[in-house]
Image: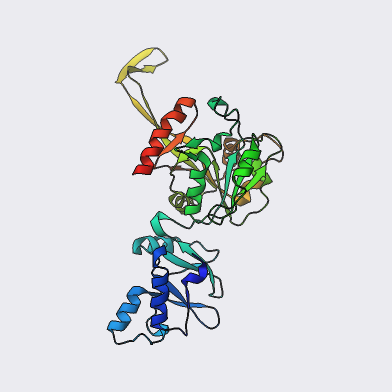
C-alpha cells in the first residue's frame, strides 16, 4: 500500500471514509489518519468509529472531524518510545503513524502479523568462504545456499524487513558478484546495499566500508545463520540495560555421563558429582552496537567481532548477553545443511 492510502482530508465525510476503508480492506487495514489543511495529522478514523458515529446520530454526510479519534497513538520520528511500543502491542494496533516534529506524516509503521519497528541499521557479513561446507560452497557462496528452496540470507533479510529496518548492508568478498547480482533489485521496495571488502577483514572489520548510517545503533550479524531471533525484544533489552554492545547468546548444555571427582590439591578426592550438567551461552554471531563505538575498529586490519568485544570490555564499556528464545542453527557441515532442510520445511508448514 502507498502511504497516501492511509490519509483522508479533514474536509471529507463519513461516507468518504467508509468508501476508502472498503477500497483498501483487502490489504488488512481498516483505519485512516486525518490530515488537516496545514498538513498535520489530527486524528484517526476506523470503520468502528464510523459505525459508532452513525449510531450516535451522525449521518454519511457528516464531517469526518466529528467522529475521528483525537487521542490516537503515534510515534515521533527519531524517538523510540518504549512505552508507546508496549502500548501498541497491548492494544493490538496494526498501523501506527510516525510523525515529523511539525506533526506531519513521515511514515506508516506496520505492526501486523508480528511485524515491528526497530530503529537500527543492519549489516550482514557475507564475505566468508564457507570452507566447512565444501564442496557445496565451491561455486556458490554460503549465504546463497538454499534451505527449503530459499537462500539462507533471504530468511534474515525477511526478518529485518519485518522489523521495519530499511538501511540494510551486506558485506561481500568470496564469490561476491553472485550476492551483488542477487540484490540487484529492491526487496519489498527496500534496496539492500552490497559492500565490497578489499580483503578478508574478519567478522567485523569490513563494517568500516559501509558509507551511510541512519541510526545510532547497528545490528551486525552473520548472514548465513538460520534463526528467528526476535529483533524487537533484542533491541528493547539493549535499551533497558543501557548497553554499549549486546551479544545474542544461544543456550548450550554439556552433560557428562560419568561421576566427576571433587578434588583438593589435585589428588585428594573430597566427593563425587554424578553425571553433572553444565549450562552455558554460546556466541550466536548477532550483535547490537552503539554506532559511536565503531571508531574503535582498526582500519584495513583483520578484526573479529570477538576482538571488538574484548576491546570494549578493556575500555570499561557495558557488554551484555541477550538469550535467544527461538531457534538458531549454525549450518557448519554438510550434514548440518542436510538436516536443516527438513526443519525449514516443517516451519513453513506450521
Can you say whether 111 is above or below 6 in the image? above
Instruction: Give the residue at x 52% y 78%.
Output: 40
Q: Is residue 190 left or right of residue 23?
A: right
The quarter of the image holding the C terminus is top left
Q: Nearer the viewer, residue 124 or 255?
A: 124
Residue 296, percent from left and from top: 65, 44
Q: Position of residue 48 (x, y in %)?
A: 32, 74
- Give the percent coordinates (x, y) of residue 286: 51, 42
Using the image, determine if residue 97 lies above or below residue 249: below
Task: Judge left or right: residue 350 versus residue 75.
Answer: left
The residue positioned farthest toward the left in the image shown: 55
**Number of numbered discs visible in the structure rendering:** 0
Q: Is residue 28 visible?
A: no
Is 172 in front, or is 306?
172
Q: Position of residue 289 (x, y in %)?
A: 56, 47
Residue 84 in sight: yes
| 273, 115: nearer the viewer | 115
For the point 40% across and 76% down, the residue is 19
Q: Nearer the viewer, residue 93 or 21?
A: 21
Amino acid at each position: 500500500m502507498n502511504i497516501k492510502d492511509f490519509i483522508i482530508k479533514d474536509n471529507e465525510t463519513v461516507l468518504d471514509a467508509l468508501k476508502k476503508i472498503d477500497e483498501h480492506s483487502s490489504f488488512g487495514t481498516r483505519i485512516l489518519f486525518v490530515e488537516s489543511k496545514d498538513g498535520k495529522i489530527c486524528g484517526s478514523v476506523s470503520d468502528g468509529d464510523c459505525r459508532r458515529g452513525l449510531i450516535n446520530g451522525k449521518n454519511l454526510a457528516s464531517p469526518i472531524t466529528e467522529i475521528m479519534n483525537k487521542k490516537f497513538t503515534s510515534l515521533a520520528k527519531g524517538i523510540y518510545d518504549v512505552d508507546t511500543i508496549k502500548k501498541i502491542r497491548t492494544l493490538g494496533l496494526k498501523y501506527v503513524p510516525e510523525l515529523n516534529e511539525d506533526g506531519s506524516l513521515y511514515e506508516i509503521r506496520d505492526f501486523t502479523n508480528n511485524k515491528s519497528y526497530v530503529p537500527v541499521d543492519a549489516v550482514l557479513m557475507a564475505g566468508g568462504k564457507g570452507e566447512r561446507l565444501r564442496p557445496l560452497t565451491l561455486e556458490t557462496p554460503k549465504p546463497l545456499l538454499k534451505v527449503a528452496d530459499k537462500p539462507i540470507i533471504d530468511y534474515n533479510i525477511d526478518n529485518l524487513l519485518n522489523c521495519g529496518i530499511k538501511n540494510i548492508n551486506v558485506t561481500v568478498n568470496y564469490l561476491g558478484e553472485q550476492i551483488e547480482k542477487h540484490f540487484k533489485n529492491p526487496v519489498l521496495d527496500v534496496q539492500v546495499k552490497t559492500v565490497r571488502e578489499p580483503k578478508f577483514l574478519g567478522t567485523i572489520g569490513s563494517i568500516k566500508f559501509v558509507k551511510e548510517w541512519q541510526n545510532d545503533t547497528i545490528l551486525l550479524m552473520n548472514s548465513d545463520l538460520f534463526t528467528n531471533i526476535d529483533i524487537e525484544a533484542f533491541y528493547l533489552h539493549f535499551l533497558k540495560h543501557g548497553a554499549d554492545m549486546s551479544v545474542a547468546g544461544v543456550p548450550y548444555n554439556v552433560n557428562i555421563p560419568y561421576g566427576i571427582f571433587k578434588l583438593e590439591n589435585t589428588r585428594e578426592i573430597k566427593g563425587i558429582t554424578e553425571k553433572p550438567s553444565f549450562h552455558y551461552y554460546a556466541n550466536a554471531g548477532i550483535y547490537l552496537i552503539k554506532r559511536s563505538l565503531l571508531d574503535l575498529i582498526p582500519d584495513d586490519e583483520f578484526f573479529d567481532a570477538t576482538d571488538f568485544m574484548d576491546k570494549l570490555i578493556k575500555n570499561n564499556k557495558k557488554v551484555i548477553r541477550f538469550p535467544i528464545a527461538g531457534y538458531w542453527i549454525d549450518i557448519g557441515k554438510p550434514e548440518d545443511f542436510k538436516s536443516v532442510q527438513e526443519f525449514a520445511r516443517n516451519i513453513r508448514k506450521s
